[in-house]
Image (cartoon, rainbow, N blue to C red):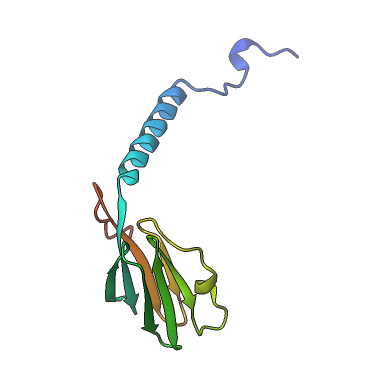
Amino acid sequence: METSESQKPRFIGILDPLIICLVGGLSWYLFTVFSQISPVCCKIYKDNALVATYELKEDRDIDLVGDVGLMKVRIEKNKVRVLSSPCKHGICVHATPIANPFQQIICVPNHVTIQIEGAGKVGRIDGIAQ
């Protein structure tokens, strides 16, 4: 049994090139907007309350008291990392240093969140994304 041309399945629809162009354009736009955000400061939260704000351009060591004990945080070369924490598994200590806006290091046992804030065209993100 032979199938005619009209019965063969179509893999590319009429609107597919338009959808591909729209997705590509949206990706390019989002890339250009978010690449203009530069890291400015590091904000430290304890139980979702802002504890401290530090500039990234100044290298320093910070001692934070959490629920489990003392955490040591280092800001160095515009990057933030956790040096030590008394929590059981030390996941925050083994986390990669953060340097880009919206990146976070979270120590759940200590109830501490460290977040990089940025400035640029998009200074804040909306309430849904937070």
Q: Is residue 39 above or below residue 121?
A: below
Q: Is residue 76 above or below residue 46?
A: above
Residue at position x 46%, y 73% in the image: 82
16 or 78, which lies in front?
A: 78
Task: Locate residue 99, reporting x and y percent.
Answer: 40, 58
102 or 74, which lies in front?
A: 74
Task: Locate residue 60, reporting x and y percent.
Answer: 36, 72
Residue at position x 40%, y 27% in the image: 21
Asked which quadrant contains residue 62, the reply is: bottom left
Viewport quadrant of the N terminus: top right
Asked which quadrant contains residue 9, the reply is: top right
Residue at position x 45%, y 23% in the image: 17
How many numbered marks appear?
Answer: 0
Task: Locate residue 84, reporting x and y percent.
Answer: 49, 79
Viewport quadrant of the C terminus: bottom left
Residue at position x 45%, y 88% in the image: 68
Task: Locate residue 50, reporting x and y percent.
Answer: 27, 75
